[in-house]
Amino acid sequence: MNFPSELKYTKDHEWVKVEGNEALVGITDFAQRELGDIVYIDINTVGDEVSKDDVFGTVEAVKTVSDLFMPVTGTVLEVNAALNDSPELVNSDPYGQGWMVKVALADVADVENLLTADAYKALVGA
């Protein structure tokens, strides 16, 4: 399993990559493995401010549907359009082309409260 050290993580298995006052958000390699083959992603929060820990969308796998939880408070600027045609990108490249949303951070300091790669790795027992 992959745990990029430059990312921050949540106990709910989302990751955050900060780029200035914006961040990319996706689900972790661990999460996509647990879900199995992802077939559909539903995110309809573009333009909305979503508070930390609130649901910003859902991901549907062959056997289940799971909520996506916002790791930091921010306004959803963009949804990864590539996922409309290729939701399997989340399975094949969860930290790259499989990102879910880009958000404008309400407070960049929120990121400091998230887990490091080592802490997340310990959480999932890897």
Image: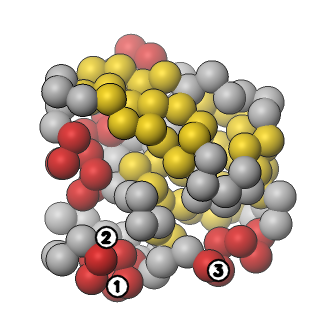
Most distant residue in the top direction: 85
Q: Earlier in the sequence, mark 3 or mark 1?
A: 3
Tell me if 15 is positioned left or right of 114 in this view.
Answer: left
Where does label 2 land, which residue?
3
Q: Quadrant of the C terminus?
A: bottom left
Q: Which amino acid, mark 2?
A: Phe
Instruction: Check disc 1 and report its element: helix, strand or loop.
Output: helix
Q: Which mark is residue 112?
A: 3
**Residue 83 visible in image:** no
Which residue does the image show at 45% across and 81% down from the upper left? Answer: 116
Cβ atoms under marks 1 and 2 closer than 8 Å:
yes
Question: Where is residue 79 shown, x and y percent of the image?
Answer: 60, 30
Helix, strand or loop at label 2? It is loop
Name the image quarter holding residue 122: bottom left
Quote the CA–CA distance across marks 3 and 1: 14 Å
Residue that mark 1 sits on: 118
Mark 2 or mark 3, whichever is nearer to me = 3
Crowd class of label 1 (few under 14; some 14 to 19; many from 20; radius 10 Å) = some
Q: Is residue 118 toward the left or the right of residue 25 in the image?
A: left
Residue type indicated by callout 1:
Asp
Name which residue type carries label 3.
Answer: Glu
